């Protein structure tokens, strides 16, 4: 699954950059992610004809993912297309992974030279896969969660959020965009270390931490169409479950 790993690295870096606050960084997110994708592939020795074609072709769905997801989060609609593009590209790269060259190159030389923990059992392919899912869980996971929330109505598109004095449920639960990546990376790391039980504790702890905030929303006198307890709870539950599924799915593919 080397192609998938390299593509996820490029997608994750792109989403990480476009989540920044500086306009120039956001504008350069897609080119930077594309360059990183190709560069990592070349460093891993993916220089065969099939490798080059796959890496170059994967730049198109990368740009499409950014365009579709930004449109959906901004104006609503198109969330299904964005998620299908992301998942379909990943499945296609996995299905065609038998055509990929054996990874090595400069990255393989460095891995053989470096004295990394567990380096005796660490291959270039596994290193790329873990790195790809790690970067993707940092920012791409947030985009996936927000797309699902918009699709079920638990989050309003940014273009409509300020209308009629409406606020986002996320304003009741602070820090979600930071806690989400942290919990996903934590679950992924614990799972890779074989501590599945400890990873489940993270899931339980989140509910305990958020409980006081959910209780405070009970006293909110706004209607359900505003930010009442029903909407805030739906936002928390749907967002949490999608975030956990992203982390657990990543863990399953890296083991």
Image (cartoon, rainbow, N blue to C red):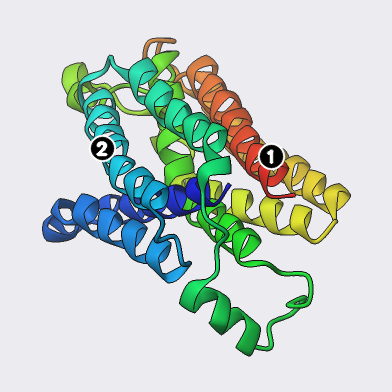
Which residue is rendered at x = 25% and y = 37% of the image? 60
| N-term mark: 2 or 1 | 2
Residue 230 on image: x %, y %: 54, 15
Q: Is residue 150 left or right of residue 229?
A: left
* Closest to the observer, 16 or 102: 102
* Closest to the observer, 7 or 41: 41
Q: Is residue 252 left or right of residue 197?
A: left
Which residue is rendered at x = 48% and y = 18% of the image? 231
Q: Is residue 66 left or right of residue 89?
A: left
Q: Residue furthest top?
A: 224
Image marks 2 and 1: residues in contact by CB distance under 8 Å: no
Report how far apart the C-alphas of labels 2 and 1 lie in the structure.
27 Å
Q: Quadrant of residue 98?
A: top right
- Give the labeled residue for mark 1: 248
Label 2: few (<14), some (14–19) or many (≥20) C-alpha neighbours in 10 Å: few
Q: Is residue 137 visible?
A: no
Kindly identify which numbered label has been placed on residue 42.
none
Residue 144 on image: x %, y %: 45, 33
Which residue is rendered at x = 29% and y = 47% of the image? 56
Q: The residue tagged with tag 1: helix, strand or loop?
A: helix
Q: Nearer the viewer, mark 2 or mark 1?
A: 2
Residue 16 on image: x %, y %: 35, 54
Residue 182 on image: x %, y %: 57, 55
Q: The residue tagged with tag 2: helix, strand or loop?
A: helix
When the figure is inspected, residue 1 is found, relative to residue 74, above or below; the finding is below
Kindly identify which numbered label has been placed on residue 60.
2
Q: Is residue 87 visible?
A: yes
Label 1: few (<14), some (14–19) or many (≥20) C-alpha neighbours in 10 Å: some
């Amino acid at each position: 699954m080397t192609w998938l790993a390299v593509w996820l690295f490029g997608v994750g870096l792109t989403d990480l950059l476009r989540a920044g606050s500086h306009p120039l960084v956001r504008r350069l997110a897609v080119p930077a992610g594309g360059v990183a994708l190709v560069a990592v592939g070349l460093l891993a020795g993916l220089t065969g004809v099939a490798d080059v074609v796959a890496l170059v072709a994967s730049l198109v769905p990368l740009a499409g993912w950014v365009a579709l997801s930004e449109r959906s989060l901004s104006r609503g609609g198109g969330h299904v297309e964005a998620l299908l593009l992301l998942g379909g590209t990943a499945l296609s790269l996995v299905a065609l992974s038998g055509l990929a060259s054996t990874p090595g190159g400069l990255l393989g030389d460095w891995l053989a030279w470096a004295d990394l923990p567990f380096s005796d059992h660490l291959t270039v392919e596994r290193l790329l896969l873990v790195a790809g899912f790690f970067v993707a869980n940092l920012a791409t996971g947030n985009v996936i969660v927000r797309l699902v929330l918009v699709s079920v109505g638990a989050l309003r598109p940014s273009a409509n959020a300020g209308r009629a004095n409406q606020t986002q449920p996320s304003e009741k639960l602070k820090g979600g965009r930071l806690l989400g990546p942290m919990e996903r990376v934590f679950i992924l790391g614990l799972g890779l270390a074989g501590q599945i039980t400890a990873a489940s504790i993270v899931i339980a702890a989140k509910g305990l931490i958020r409980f006081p905030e959910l209780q405070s929303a009970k006293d909110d006198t706004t209607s359900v169409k505003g930010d009442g307890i029903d909407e805030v709870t739906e936002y928390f539950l749907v967002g949490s479950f999608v975030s956990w599924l992203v982390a657990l799915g990543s863990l399953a593919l890296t083991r």
